Amino acid sequence: FHLTFTAFMLPIPVSQELFRAFPKQTMAPNDATAADASPPSTHEDVVSRVFLIRHGDRFDYANDHWAPAAKRFGCLTTDPPLSALGHRQAKETADYLAETISKNSDSGIGSNTNISKIMVSPYLRVIQTACPTSDAFDVPLSIEGGLSEAHATPGDVLPSPEERFAYFPHVDPTYQSLHRVEPTPGFTCPKTGHDCEAFAGHYTKRMGEFAKKIEEHHRGEVIVCFSHAASVALVAALLKCSMRELKFAACGVYELEQINDGPWRMVNNGDSNPHVSETSPTTYPWGFSEKHFQEVDGGRYFGESEGVGLDYFVPS
C-alpha cells in the first residue's frame, strides 16, 4: 500500500533558550521493578529526568518507491521524511508528553518539571517527530550531533541547523551541539558511500560519552531527546545495563530519572508505544543483537575487536 505524505506546520517564535545501582546483569531492568527500587523524591531532592523518544513511522519504509526516486534526483536516501502515519504518531506523542509532565507537576515529583531543552538528531524524520512537542511546550529544537543516526556521516552531508531553520522555524540555529561525531577512518556508509562513524562499536562508545555530557550539562533538569532506534544504547549507558533486551518502538518513550547523585532508574519503557492509536509493521521495535558487533569477512558491522558488545555498559 502507499501512504500520501502530508506535512502541516505553523511557524513559532524561537524561544530562549539517572536507579539504584544495578548488579552486573545481562538483562535489561524491568521498568516496574526499577520504579519500586528507589524511594519517591521530595521537593528538596535534585531530580534529573530524560525522555528519550524514537522518531515515528518512516515514509521510505511505508513507500518503497521513494528511495529509488530520491537517489535518482540526487537526494540523501538515509534522510527520509515521516509518513502520514508518522506525523499522526508525532502529534499523539506530544499529547502524551504533555499529559505525563502535567501529572508529574501535579504530584510534586522533583524540584523542576518544566522542559529545559528539546534535543533532536539532525535527521529530517526526527526533526519532524519533535515539531509537535516543540509547539506544545513552546521550547525550540536544539539539533544535537550526539543523537545522530547509526552510520552517521559527519560534515556537510546533512543540512546545517541554519538550513533546517528555513523550513523548520522550531529549530534554534544558535545552539551549540554537546557532541561532535567524527568519521572512523576506513569506514563508509553502506547506503551512501560517505565517510561515517563505525557501527555499532563507535556508535555505542559515542552513546556512552553523550550520557556523561547529559549528566554534566543537564543535572536537575527535564530534557527531551528525539533520536533513532539504536539510541537504546543511550538508555543502557545511563542505566549501566545490558542492551540485550532493550528495544525501541516507533515513537516509543523511555523515561529515565535520577535523584540527586544516585543511579538512574527507568520510569517508562520505550519498547512499546501504547499512546499512539496506530502502528505499522514497517517501522517495528528494533534492538541490538550480537551480529551488530561482529566483524566477519570485512562486513558492515564493527565492535568486537575493541571489546564493544551488548554488555558494554554493564559494570565489570
Image (spheres, helix red, strand yellow):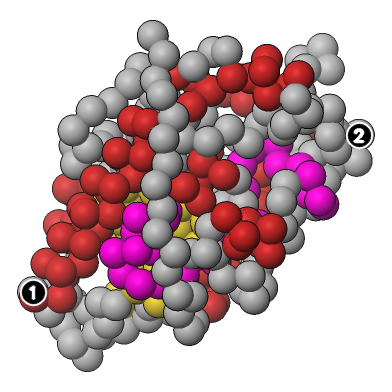
Give the quarter of the image for residue 43: bottom left
Residue at left offset 16%, top offset 83%: 42
**Among numbered discs 1 and 2, the one appearing first in the sequence:** 1
Q: Nearer the viewer, residue 13 or 119?
A: 13
Magenta extent: 129-157
Query: Residue 278: horizontal and vertical position, in percent?
Result: 23, 28
Left/right placement of residue 259 relative to residue 67 reads: left
Query: Residue 12: horizontal and vertical position, in percent?
Result: 42, 69
Amino acid type at image mark 2 = Gly
Locate the N terminus by quadrant. top left
Left/right placement of residue 44 relative to residue 270 reads: left
Magenta stretch holds residue 134: yes
Residue at left offset 75%, top offset 25%: 73
Can you name the residue that lies furthest to the right here?
Answer: 186
Name the mark on residue 186.
2
- For label 2, the SS is loop
Name the mark on residue 309.
none
- For label 1, the SS is loop
Residue at left offset 82%, top offset 52%: 155
Q: Return the residue at label 1.
A: 107
Q: Using the rendered image of the protein, determine whether residue 157 is visible from the camera's viewpoint.
A: yes
Q: Is residue 50 above or below residue 34?
A: below
